[in-house]
Amino acid sequence: MCGIAGLIHRGKSSDVGNELQLMLQALKHRGPDSTGYALYADNDGENFIMRFKVGENVGEGSTSVNEDDSVYDKRKELVDQMLKSLGAKVLKEEKLTPYSYRYEMQYDEDLMDFSKKIESIESVEILSIGKSLELIKDLGDAQEVLDRYDLGKVRGTHAIGHARMATESGVDIKSAHPFWGYPFSDVSVVHNGQLTNYWNNRRMLENKGMRFMSECDSELIAVYIAEKMRNGASLEEGMKDSLSGLDGVFTYFVATKDSLGMAKDTMAAKPLVLYESDDLVAMGSEEIAIRSILPQEIDTYDPFDGEVKVWQI
Amino acid sequence: MANLKTTEKKTKAQSMGLHTEVLTGKTQQKFFNPDEAENFYYWGTYDVDFNKRIDLDVNDLDCKEANKKIDELMSQGYGTIVIKNPQGKHSLGVGVLNKLNLIFEGSLGYFGVGSIDGPTVRINGRVGWSCAENMMAGKVVIEKNAGSCFGAAVRGGDLICKGSVGARTGIDQKGGTIIVGGDAGAFTGFMMQRGRIIILGNVGINLGDSMYDGTIYVGGKIGSFGSDAIESPMTKSDIDWIKRKLKVAEIGENFDISKMTKVVAGKKLWNYDALEPTEKKGAI
C-alpha cells in the first residue's frame, strides 16, 4: 500500500525533519517496513553531501543476509581509496550506523562516472549526492529512523518521505524509498503504486547507461525522469512524459534543490490529498498526514487523474 | 439437538399456514414468531429526540471509540450530535441506522459515514475516499471537496458534495442520488446499476464506463464517454426533477439545467457472448 508525504515552505525555512516525521508517523499503517526521508536542508551549498551505505540493516524484519561489522569497515576503506583516486576531497565524515555514512566533500567532475566507480565496490550504494539533499532511509517507522539518524535538528525548505509496505521486493534499505535521481545531484523520488512495464523500461534505460540498484519498480520513476532531464527536459516536462511512458498505477513526488512536484496516473487509482497556501504546500496519501502538522481547519483537495504540479521554494 | 422430525411443537407461523414443511435434514430452521419481542428489535436503532443536542470531541479518540460513543449517545436519546475535531480520521460515523442529526465540524478521512441508513449528516469540511459507501437512506451534505469513490455502491438517499470530487464517483451505484457542485474525476458512474448522478461542473475521462443502468447529468465539459455510455435527450421531467433535487441540496440556484448533458447506458454490454473462441470460430 505505502504512504507518501511531502511539504514545501515557500520563502522560508522550517523544521522539516520533525514535520515530515509527524506526517510519516500518521501514515505508519500504510507502510510499517521501512521509512525514508529526503530533506532539503539549509546547508551552505558549497560542498556535496554524499550519503552512502556499505551494507544492509540486518535487524528484525530484514530480508538481508547477516554480515559482520568488520566487512562494513573494509568496504568503507575501499570507498575512501576510491574517493582519493577520483580526486574527491573529503572535508567531513560521519559514521551514522555501522553500515551508513555521511560525507561532506568537494568534487568537480561528472557525477555519473563518479557514482559508477564508487558503486563498483561490492555492496556499496550511494543513497544520495547533493548540495542540499539529505536522503536517509532505513528499516523501522518514522520515529525510529528519525531518532537513529538524529533528523530532528534538520531545518530546510522542503522534504518528501515514504512509509513502505514491501510487496514485490525485499525488506531492505536498497528497496526503500526515496530513490536518488541518479546521476543528478539533489533529485529524489517517492512513489505509491505499482508499475507494470518496469522491465521493458529498465532494459531500455540500462542500454542508455542508467543504473538500477534494486528490483523495486519505484526506482524506475527516479531513473526515468533523470534520463529525461539528462536529455534537456525540465522536471515538469519529464513528469508529464512519465504519464504515458510509465504503465500502471501511481502517485509520486519528485523533489529537486528548489522545487517539489507531484504526478498522478491517468486512472487516479492511488490517493493523494493536497493543501496549498501562499507559503506552504503539504500533501500526503491521507488527510491525517496533513492534519498532523496543520490541525486547524484548512481546505484540502484530491488532484485529478493525470495531473502534474510543480512548486518552487 | 432436538429431533426436528418428531417435534410436535409448531410455531405460530406454521399454524397460520405460512410454513407447512417438516424438516428432515440437519438444517435448523428458525421460524419468525411475531410473539417474540426480539423479532421487532432492529440493532442500532433508538428513540432519539432531535432537540436533545450534545457535542462530542473526538480529538483523543480513535475511530472505534468515537463510533461507540456516538452509539451510546443515541441510546441515551440524543438526536443531534456534533462531532468536534474529527481531524481527518477514518471511518467516523459509520453504521448509523437511525434517524439522527449528525454534524461534523471538520474533515473526515476514508470511509466516512459508510453503511448508514437514515441519518441526516452535515460535514463542514472535506471527506476522503469512499465517503458514504453503501449508504441506504438519509442525507449527507459535504461543504467542501471529496476524495475518490465518492458514494461507492450507494443504494438510496441523497449524497451531496458542494465542492469537487475525485475519480470513480458513484462506482457501482445501486440507487439514490449523488449531487456534486463542482467537478468530478475520471470514471464517474463506473459500472453504475441504478440511481442518478448530477455533476454541475466538468467530468474527466471515461464517464459512465460500463454502466448497466441509471442516469448521469453533467453541467460542464465531459472528458470522454466510457464504454457503452451514450447521450440521451433531456426531457422536461429531467429538468423538473433536477430543479427539485438542487433545491434540496442547496446548490446551483441559478444553474441552467436545460443545457446539461444526460448520459445513460447504451445497454450493448448486456448481451454477453457465452461462446468460447473455438466455438465461435465453428459457429461462423
Image: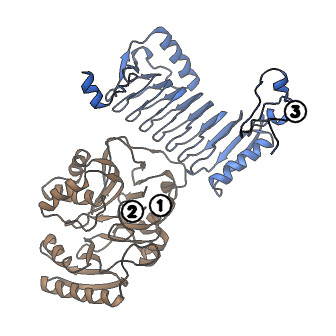
Chain colours: A brown, B blue
Q: Quickly name the residue at label 3.
A: B9
Q: Residues within 10 Å of mark 1 (few under 14, many from 20)?
A: many
Which residue is pictured at 26% across the width and 56% down the height?
A221
Q: Quickly name the residue at label 1.
A: A23
Which of disc 1 and disc 2 is earlier in sequence?
Answer: 1
SS of the residue under disc 3: loop
Q: Is residue B194 left or right of residue A97?
A: right
Can residue B119 be seen here? The reply is no
What amino acid is at disc 2?
A: Gly
SS of the residue under disc 2: strand
Which residue is pictured at 42% across the width and 48% down the height?
A271
Give me the chain letter of mark 3: B
Instruction: Measure the alpha-carbon separation of dots 2 and 1.
Output: 9 Å
Point out residue A131 in the picture as x, y percentages from the top left corner: 25, 71
SS of the residue under disc 1: helix
Where is residue A148, by image quadrant?
A: bottom left
Are labels 2 and 1 assigned to the same chain?
yes
Q: Is residue A102 left or right of residue B79?
A: left
